[in-house]
Every structure is written in C-alpha cells, then in structure tokens.
Amino acid sequence: MTRAGENKDARKAFEKTIKLRPEKVEAHIGMALLFTAANKLRDAERAAARAVSLDSRNAEAHYALGLVRLRQGSPTKALAEANTALQFNPDFGAALLLKKEASLESYAAAYAERAERYRKLNQPAPSLSPEERGEINNLLKEAAESVEKYLKLSPASPDAARLREQAETLRLHSDSVSQSDAPLVYKMDTVTTKAQILSKPEPLYTEEARQKGVKGTIRLRLALSFDGQVRHILVVKGLGEGLTQMAVNAARGIKFTPATKDGRPVSQFVTIEYNFNIY
C-alpha cells in the first residue's frame, strides 16, 4: 500500500501490526517513513527512534531516523545515521543518497554559519583555514563517493544521468577546495581579469511554494566556463517545493564574459544568490 501511494491504508496496516506485535521493527520503520512524508516530524522521530531501540543493528531503522534528522535541519546527525546504516549494509542505495544529501547540507550549514559569524562582526570572511578546507573537502568528497557507489549499484536508475553530473560536480568542487596545483576552474582571486556577468535571469516561483508560503535565499556555487557556458552548479543552500530546481534552471541561462588568466579565457568559480519572497 505504501508503494502504491495508499498511505492512509498503509498506516492502518502498520498500526494494526504494531498492536499485534509491538516488537515488529519493520512496522515502526514504515510508520516513520509515512510520518516523514506527511511532514509529521515529531511522530516520525518517535517511530524511528523506537525502531532503532528495538534493533540497533537494523540499517533501515537508522536510515529512517537519519531521514527525519535531515528534515529537522540536523544534517550532522543525519550523516551519522546514514553512516551507521551503511556500516550494517554497505550496499544500501537509499542510505548512500541520504549520506550525499546530509554531506551537502552539512557543507551548506558550515558555509552559512561561517558567513553569518563574520557578518555579525561586520568583517569580510577571510580565506579558509587548512582545517576548514580539509573539513569541507571531506564532506564534498564523501558526497561524491556516495553518488558514485549508488550508480555502480543502480546503473539503470532513471536519475543516473543527473547523478553522474552531480558526482562530477562534487569532485570538481572538492578539488577546488583542496587547491589543486593545476585547477580546471580558477577561484576569483587567482585570475587576471574576473568573469563579468552580463545578464542573470530570475527564477520562476512554483505554485506549490507560493501556496505553502516558502521563502528565503538559495545560494549556488558554479563555474562560468571559458567557453561561455554555465557548468558544475553546486547547491550550497536550497529551498523546498521546487524552488531550488527553478534557481538552477535560471542559473543555466546566465550570460557572461569569461575570466582570463595570462591573456587566455579560463573558467572561474562564482557564488550567486536568488531571493524568494511573497508579496
């Protein structure tokens, strides 16, 4: 019933199972996933925690709890649960994708916290320290590795093309953070002339986001390529209800003059923001 989208009947079946056999771990996991899908995160947390308490070595129980933690805005805790799930089942595809999402959210949270800290001090954020570079590099590298392993396990996935592009993007950004000696894409402070954005299309507001009152800022890190194309878009901070995808679609339409290095066009990383507000 869950797979058929009959969530109301699925919930009744899980509740009856739990009444008859309270120790049935799978029923608590099923309830946790249903509550998560309905955005009833407190109920989801209780159900997932119960599943973990019944069987602390159950990979799906840790996955369910990790999914809840991610939705609650605790990516570090979500990443820990994803890693635990993979410890017990290294080939658990859903946990691999959860690890990717949690790694990216952890990266975004660290980026946002650092920017806010210096904003409050009214100071420009300095260059990353070696420790900060190492931490961010590890998060991006782990996210890429998770996607790559998922693709090996599920090469025929309908999302395979998008995930391959995402893995390549994560690798490239990871290499950039670790400051490769011969970068494919340069940072702003290492080019002779910076890329100049000529036009930046505004993203559309989805009807779902409008109905639910979703607003905020989406931050993207991307490469303005030497050939005039926008490539390797990495979501640093996203929003729900389709707004992140709208921002990515808009970013692909940016027109610009490429950066140069020693007289030749080169690719350069930039960070851009899109603000969504309801008037």
Image (spheres, rainbow, N blue to C red):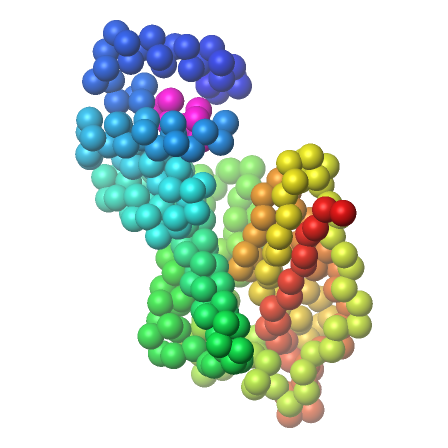
* Left-right relation of 231 to 6: right
* Left-right relation of 93 to 262: left
In the displayed image of the protein, which residue is found farthest to the bottom? 262
**Does any portion of residue 171 appear in the rendered image?**
no
Q: Vertical placement of 46 versus 169: above or below?
A: above
Q: Residue at x 37, y 57 (%)?
A: 142
Q: Is residue 193 magenta?
A: no
Quadrant in the picture for residue 196: bottom right
Q: Residue at x 68, y 87 (%)?
A: 193
Give the image location of residue 16, x and y in percent.
33, 8
Q: Residue at x 42, y 33 (%)?
A: 41
* Left-right relation of 50 to 110: left
Q: Which residues are magenta?
A: 29-37
Give the image location of residue 82, x and y in percent.
33, 44
Give the image location of residue 21, x and y in percent.
23, 11
Quadrant in the picture for residue 237: bottom right
Front in this rendered view, residue 183 or 215: 215
Q: Vertical placement of 121 versus 271: above or below?
A: below
Front in this rendered view, residue 191 or 125: 125
Majority secondary structure of magenta residues: helix
Q: Residue at x 29, y 13 (%)?
A: 18
Q: Vertical placement of 173 versus 13: above or below?
A: below
Number of marks present in the image shown? 0
Give the image location of residue 210, x and y in percent.
70, 39
**Does any portion of residue 11 appear in the rendered image?**
yes
